[in-house]
Amino acid sequence: MAFEGLADRLQNTIQRIKGKGKVTEQDVKEMTREVRLALLEADVNFKVVKDFVKRVKERAVGQEVMESLTPGQQVIKVVKEELTNLMGGDESKIAVAKRPPTVIMMVGLQGAGKTTTTGKLANHLRKKHNRKPMLVAADVYRPAAINQLQTLGKQLDLPVYAKGTDANPVDIANEAIAEAKENHYDYVIIDTAGRLHIDGELMGELQQIKDNVQPDEIFLVVDAMTGQDAVNVAESFDEQLEVSGVVLTKLDGDTRGGAALSIKAVTGKPIKFAGMGEKLDQLEAFHPERMASRILG
Ligand code: GDP
């Protein structure tokens, strides 16, 4: 379960401070020390942890007294608010182009869950937003990736635009968008190539698709289980492509939460969705406040 390890690790500390009728500076110090260690063990970025603890300390020590809460509860409220801010504050939405179709470009490393997420996102747009999405197979290097997307399209009963492995990804994307326009599809979701590692060639190709297609959203798909590696990947992709949001996959298996808690603070880009399983309906809008509640109980 997402954040389970971190939540377990923090439970005693939270219970201890929650019960206090009076919270001293020493209590706050001890609590933040525990929180700091727990976050570091959860593989949260070092600088993010440092800033977080500093903010909590400042607010928890100097906070206004509210009559409805005990001092202990107020300290936990501060921690919860700061955790929520860390993960992005308000939930984010998906762009809607003034003139359809809205174009979403999916980018990420191989194995992160990009193709699965492309299908999940299409399913989400149709079910939750009543949209007509079309999928585009623009990973021309791996026939398996094209087949995978076509299989997903069949499962979802949604069209997949594919031209095999000989066509140029930019042409594929442009032709798919033209076809979507003609057939009144309002979202086009492009599954781009992924590699095992970031390299100049991949980035060059993605940049070219971006420049030509001018997508309304670029979603970077990263694997939550890879912790700080996911954060580094996000930083690199964002530097080169300026992504608009992150989809964090495999959060269902990530008990620590290091990537979830670091990505927004490090890259400035919000996590828009979380993958919570392999099935096509297991994509959730990412709600920072709900995630903070999971951690603090
Ligand atoms: P790609 O290479 O980035 O396109 O990755 P795939 O979409 O092929 O996914 C790689 C593996 O991760 C597959 O076995 C997926 O079923 C699995 N996967 C993707 N998203 C999730 C998720 O949110 N949770 C879990 N548990 N598995 C996922």
Image (cartoon, rainbow, N blue to C red):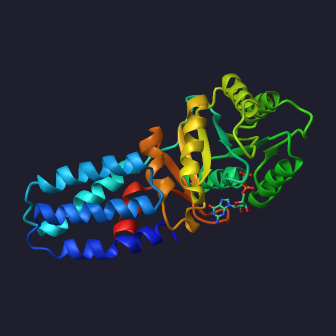
Q: Is residue 30 above or below residue 92?
A: below
Left or right of 59? Residue 162 is right
> x, y (%) of residue 18?
20, 72
Left or right of 293? Residue 285 is right
Q: How many marks?
A: 0
Is residue 271 or residue 19 the one in the foreground? 19
Dividing the picture into quadrants, the one containing residue 35 is bottom left
Left or right of 162? Residue 225 is left
Residue 187 shows up from this direction: no
Q: Is residue 163 above or below residue 284?
A: above
- Which residue appears at 42% of the width and 68% of the height? 6
> x, y (%) of residue 107?
67, 41
Taking the image as four quarters, which one is ligand 1 found in? Answer: bottom right
Residue 181 shows up from this direction: yes
Left or right of 292? Residue 233 is right
- Which residue appears at 85% of the width and 39% of the height? 140
- Which residue appears at 51% of the width and 68% of the height? 255
Q: Is residue 96 above or below residue 23?
A: above
Q: Is residue 291 above or below residue 263?
A: below
> x, y (%) of residue 65?
7, 59
Is residue 53 or residue 124 the one in the foreground? 53
> x, y (%) of residue 95?
53, 38
